Amino acid sequence: MAIPRAAKTQRRTRIQEEKEEIILEAALDVFSVNGFRGTTIDQIAEVAGMSKPNLLYYFRTKEAIHRALIDRVLFTWLEPLRAFDANGNPESEIRSYIRRKLEMARDFPRESRLFANEMLQGAPHVEDELRGPLKALVDEKAEVIRAWAATGKITKCDPYHLIFSIWSTTQHYADFDVQVRAVLGQEHAGEGRFEDAARYLEQLFVDGLGIRRS
Amino acid sequence: MAIPRAAKTQRRTRIQEEKEEIILEAALDVFSVNGFRGTTIDQIAEVAGMSKPNLLYYFRTKEAIHRALIDRVLFTWLEPLRAFDANGNPESEIRSYIRRKLEMARDFPRESRLFANEMLQGAPHVEDELRGPLKALVDEKAEVIRAWAATGKITKCDPYHLIFSIWSTTQHYADFDVQVRAVLGQEHAGEGRFEDAARYLEQLFVDGLGIRRS
DNA sequence: GGATAATTTGACCGGTTGGTAAACATTACA
DNA sequence: TGTAATGTTTACCAACCGGTCAAATTATCC
């Protein structure tokens, strides 16, 4: 007797792991562009190269696919902030945080857009994670920044808005990619734009935060 | 004999103007959250307080509503950049540009999100406007900034990425509003967050661009 | 107040959507 | 190799979707 849904089994087979990977990959393509409501299971199934019922054998509902995707993205998305080190010096920490975030915008733009889509809709599926783990992590790093300001290593400033400004400026290159390309035009829209952005942003933040350049 | 569609008449009646306004207002509510594909005509009609066929009497298709909305938003959205004055001094121009953009994020968050939704989807309805009028305007203002840098009024930097960074940091407070509120927490998420943001961002950009404070 | 134009409604249509049921095919494993 | 568990497909359903139509209602203006 077949178990109704693969998800209910305890041990996952080889095929399950492979197919779930393919489905999530396809779902990332579609969700990141069309958002949750704008995405259809048929679209995902087509990109994944399987029939809709077959896809629904691995994920019971559209919500289940979306949730699995969000969970995975949320974790890796905060990696750079976790790496932000209290013991490092402000200049190198800020610089490498900006660089890491820009690399993610370049290498994982779909993940960024999936997240942005969720925010635009008012975070109906992740509001708890924002108020919980995310806020806790930001609070912790904000304390580090506040300490830097207190000891005169950087100019006094609101650490939360500082973090927001790094998030927004870097993710902009993933989320608003079309606009960036359109405005830069043919000649400057090559992959070099990420290096230009890194140079500009590092300068802006290092000088803007009153960090002595070493 | 009634003219099939109100849109075809030359002169618009009082009722037409009022109803079209109500419809666009309702459509802004729904489109800005759910995106184009994720929005249904029924949703808009319900928010607008009228039946679907009645709504379709004023706008023939879903695309027509969306287009009318985008056209209107695009124009007003660029108002602050147009006001950016070549003859002003860098500090006051940058400061007031930031302030104006932040005010728009605070007062017209739905417009910002509508635009962001369109960008995330790859700008299928406005790519021409981006490559044309928007790029032209940005090119013009970038030249102003370049001149400031050439005469030593501000630090040399890429003017395009400078504009991107002002756009992204300010619009962030509209587009990622849920996240901002969640991270700031109950105590700091009041309306004061816009003033905190203004203070922080003005400092960041004035110092980051090497502008002498007056 | 009546003719005429503008507006509103309910019923409807073909196509799409999320999801199911059951038959069929394949794999893993004793 | 047989068989039970896993995986896949076809056919299908009820609800929803964008949009039409004709009839009914309301506003306008002489």
Image (tube, coloured by chain):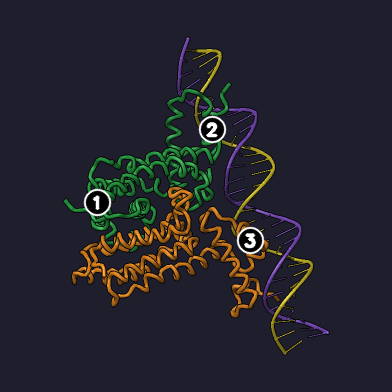
Chain colours: A orange, B green, C yellow, D purple
Indicate which disc residue A45 carries.
3
Q: In this view, does A186 lie to the left or right of C30?
A: left
What's the CA distance linking mark 1 and mark 2? Answer: 58 Å
The N terminus of chain A: image quadrant: bottom right
Of tags 1 and 3, the one toward the viewer is 1
In the picture as drawn, the residue positioned furthest to the front comes out as B150
Q: Which element is circle 2 on?
A: helix
**Chain label for disc 1:** B
Circle 2 sits on which residue? Answer: B57
| Residue B33 appears in the figure | no
- The lab-note entry on whether marks 1 and 3 share a chain reads no
| Residue A50 appears in the figure | yes
Q: Which element is circle 1 on?
A: loop
The number of discs equals 3
In front of the other: A86 or B164: B164
| Percent of width and height locating residue A133 | 38, 70
Residue drawn 35% across and 54% down? Answer: B158
Amino acid found under the numbered disc labelled 3: Ala
- The lab-note entry on whether marks 3 and 2 share a chain reads no
- Tell me the quarter of the picture where residue A131 sits: bottom left
